[in-house]
Image: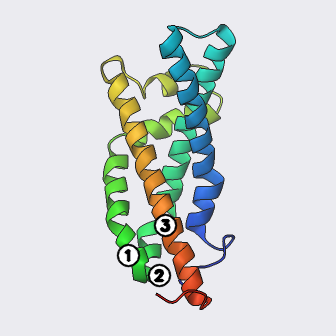
Amino acid sequence: MSRSPSNNEDPVTRLHTHYFQASELMRRHFHKLDAERKDRGKLSRAKRADWYQYWKFWLGTLYVVIEGFEGLKIEAILSTRGGEFVELIPQCRELKRITDQHKDSLRLFRNGTFHFHRHPENLAQFFPDEDRIARLKWAEELHLKLAAFFSKYRGIRVLAYLEEAHVWDP
């Protein structure tokens, strides 16, 4: 395998494109309505329903990204590719450290979001009253660190592609 496979062959790019971008979209919509809620002190019933759905789908898809990140063994992919890709390995390790704090709880939340349950325990357990704000901050931090990882990965990938195509020689 070359250092920079095509988009369709690159599992890291697929994880970003098919899953992380969906999570990012839900996060943006959630934050937009959350800012409106904070400015106005409340949301209309329809917007409150949308806010709740964006929040659930953001966190649910965030777990899907975590699941893909771990399942793909991204650190091994980076090691195999070598070059500048290995510079991302510390970010992978940091992401794993952060993820491990609440991963199992987020998995249950995802299950509660994407699978029918008669009772909402899987959703509620992710946000215990004493830890609600901390969990949301954790999800935000994790999301931003994933965004930084994917951004740097894409930059390295483009440069590797240009080098292999002999379009750019540093």
Closer-to-camera residue (11/143):
143
Q: In x, y percent, where is residue 76? A: 43, 74
Position of residue 149 relative to residue 102, above or below, is: below
Closer-to-camera residue (45/124):
45
Asked if labels 3 and 2 touch by Cβ distance under 8 angstroms, the answer is no
- Dot 2: element: helix
Q: Which mark is residue 34?
A: none
Classify mark 2: residues with Cα within 10 Å, few (<14), some (14-19) or many (20+).
Answer: some
Asked if labels 2 and 1 touch by Cβ distance under 8 angstroms, the answer is yes
- Dot 3: element: helix
- Residue found at x 33% / y 48%: 98
Asked if labels 1 and 3 touch by Cβ distance under 8 angstroms, the answer is no
Q: Is residue 118 left or right of residue 156?
A: right
Q: Which mark is residue 81?
A: 2
| Dot 3 or dot 1, earlier in sequence | 1
- Residue found at x 52% / y 22%: 34
Which residue position is annotated with label 3?
Answer: 153
Q: CA distance from mark 1 to mark 2?
A: 8 Å
Q: CA distance from mark 2 to mark 3?
A: 12 Å
Position of residue 29 relative to residue 144, above or below, is: above
| Dot 2 or dot 3, earlier in sequence | 2
- Residue found at x 61% / y 49%: 21
In the image, what residue type sits under mark 2? Arg
In the image, what residue type sits under mark 3? Tyr
Q: In x, y percent, where is residue 36? A: 55, 18
Closer-to-camera residue (123/49):
49
Position of residue 47 relative to residue 56, above or below, is: above
Q: In x, y percent, where is residue 157? A: 53, 74
Classify mark 1: residues with Cα within 10 Å, few (<14), some (14-19) or many (20+).
Answer: some
Which residue position is annotated with label 1?
Answer: 86
